[in-house]
Image (cartoon, rainbow, N blue to C red):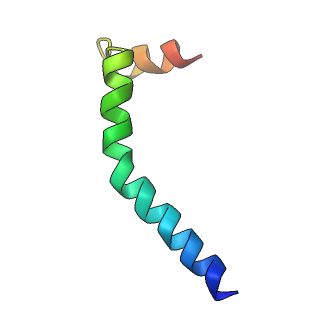
Amino acid sequence: MSWLIVVVLAVLALLIVAGPVLEDLIDRVWPPGPGPAARRAHRR
């Protein structure tokens, strides 16, 4: 069961590290509009 905890912690660490990088890549592919509402509408 301890390996499950290790896997969960590893995934959380990857998300924390890769989160800002992924957001930066998404902003480059889809340039942000006037605000969060425009980005939310674009994702639909």
Q: Quadrant of the image for the N terminus? A: bottom right
Compared to 26, does 22 lie above or below? below
**Residue 30: x %, y % from top left:** 38, 15
Please give left or right for residue 9 compared with residue 24 in the image. Answer: right
Left or right: 1, with 17 as reference point: right
Residue 2: image x %, image y %?
Answer: 63, 87
Work out whether 23 lies above or below 16: above
Q: How many labels sit on residues? A: 0
The residue drawn where x is 29% and y is 12% is: 34
Q: Position of residue 25 (x, y in %)?
A: 34, 28
Q: Quadrant of residue 36?
A: top left
Residue 22 spot, x, y in % from top left:
38, 37
Q: Quadrant of residue 38?
A: top left
**Furthest residue toward right:** 1
Q: Which quarter of the figure is the C terminus placed in? A: top right
Please tell me in which quadrant of the rendered image residue 17 appears: bottom left
**Residue visible at 31% across and 20% down in the picture:** 28
- Give the camera-side residue of 21 and 44: 21
Q: Is residue 18 left or right of residue 6?
A: left
Instruction: Tell me the residue at 48%/63% (across/down).
Output: 12
Give the residue at x 44% y 54%. Answer: 15
The residue at the far bottom in this view is 2
